[in-house]
Amino acid sequence: MIAPLRAVFLRDLRIAFRVGGGAGIGVVFFLALVTVIPFAVGPDLPLLARIGPAVLWIGALLASLLGLDRIFSADHEDGSLDVMLLAPAPLELIAAAKGAAHWVATGLPLVIAAPLLGLLLGLEPALLGAITLTLLLGTPALTFLGLVGAALAVALPRGGLLVAVLILPLTIPVLIFGVAATVGAAGGPVPFDMPLRLVGALSLVTFVIGPVAAAAAIRNIRD
Amino acid sequence: MRLIAEKLTCVRGGRTLFRNLQFEVAAGRVLAITGPNGAGKSSLLRLIAGLLRPASGRIALEGGEPGQPVGPFAHFIGHLDATKGALRASENLEFMQVLLGGGGQTTGEALAALGLDGLADVPVRMFSAGQRRRLALARLLVAPRPLWLLDEPTTALDAEGQETFAALAAKHLAGGGLIVAATHAPLKIPSVQEIRLGTGGAA
């Protein structure tokens, strides 16, 4: 049962890195967003440092919405999804493997880029570590929530924008607790670890629910 | 093993494609589905595979366990080839082999059988339509399944490719396999039964 899932995971990863644009587009978008903020806000370093964690989280959130709609629709368009539906492995697990591959290809590069971009915003080194940790625990939740939207995109050709609009409200709790944890790490009123644990919990819950919902959506809307 | 369809009705987009369709395919036999464009040939194949739900009726594979869906016993090769241009031919086929449970020929043997042995390391985006088709058909060999559901299997294949396919199909049938194929071109396979769709609903 493990071998087919590993095969799905490695295949999606290979395609993401070979086609290009998988990891690259998200990181470039993230970079663009974070670099234009100081121009808009002005040369106020204390202010930048204060809103820095929120900027990084918003950047990561928006960047992770890019490319979500292709997770299943690319396989739908070339017939691969038909074969996956006839595979012995349950579609739920295949969806989970695809989600994991998507996170490694697009979410993980954002986590790795975050501390570098944090330097641009003048954040303290200790805070950089805290933000990276919250993103590491939080971006899987964004991907696996997005998996449900990606499944709906199968029925909606060129539904990329719609997927982003559908998924964005669902990601708000992740954003709130992710930023709350980093504010806590900066010495705010909330402790660091409580919101951090909630972010981790959201990732675990979506890791279970996302693939099941995505598989149900694919089974029901394909025609 | 026998494939049985009882009183199948297919409705797509509010239009009834066929109604009360009945057929039986025995082991070692081929069912050719013919009919004009839009008659529901591809839809019938998807119904058999379980990729579409019939409006009414039943499809069963006798000889397996009762109540089993047909899908896990079937290969479905639609008009799309299910290949990824970014991957090499061997990577595409290895993925299909593992995904579908394997147990058949090695990918090298299957590629050779379809005349693709020199192209294993070539990215599939460089392939012609006929070569992609050959790669899709190679899937039939790496994971043996008793029922082949093929939508225009010989499209884009050259004369030699059609001969190769006919030989593979004959071998599959001799081993007790079943084939249901939607086709316009005559399949160069003996013992073909035919149903014709699109003549007022029922065949």
Image (cartoon, coloured by chain):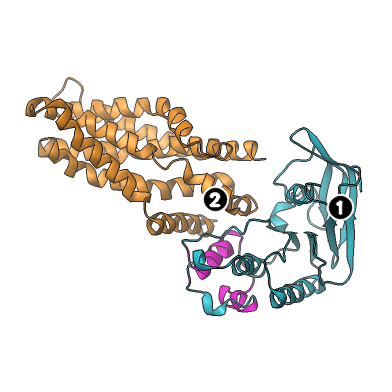
Is residue B130 toward the left or the right of residue A55 in the image?
Answer: right
The residue range painted magenta reads: B87-113
Residue A214 location, x and y as percent?
A: 54, 38
Q: Which residue is mark 1?
A: B4
Residue A87 location, x and y as percent?
A: 62, 54
Residue B114 quadrant? bottom right
Q: Amino acid at mark 1?
A: Ile
Quarter the N terminus of chain A occupies: bottom right
Chain ID for cyan: B
User: Secondary structure beneath disc 2?
Assistant: helix
Question: Relative to the observer, which residue lies in front, A113 or A195?
Answer: A113
Residue A168 quadrant? top left
Residue A10 drawn in magenta: no
Question: In the rendering, what colour is chain A?
Answer: orange
Residue B32 location, x and y as percent?
A: 84, 60
Is residue B90 toward the left or the right of residue A60 in the image?
Answer: right
Q: Which residue is mark 2?
A: A75
Whether discs 2 and 1 lie on one chain: the answer is: no
- Up-down: is A158 above or below B59? above
Q: Chain of mark 1?
A: B
Q: Residue at x 52, y 75 (%)?
A: B119
Q: Amino acid at mark 2?
A: Asp
Q: Residue at x 30, y 25 (%)?
A: A176
Is residue A223 toward the left or the right of residue B64 in the image?
Answer: left
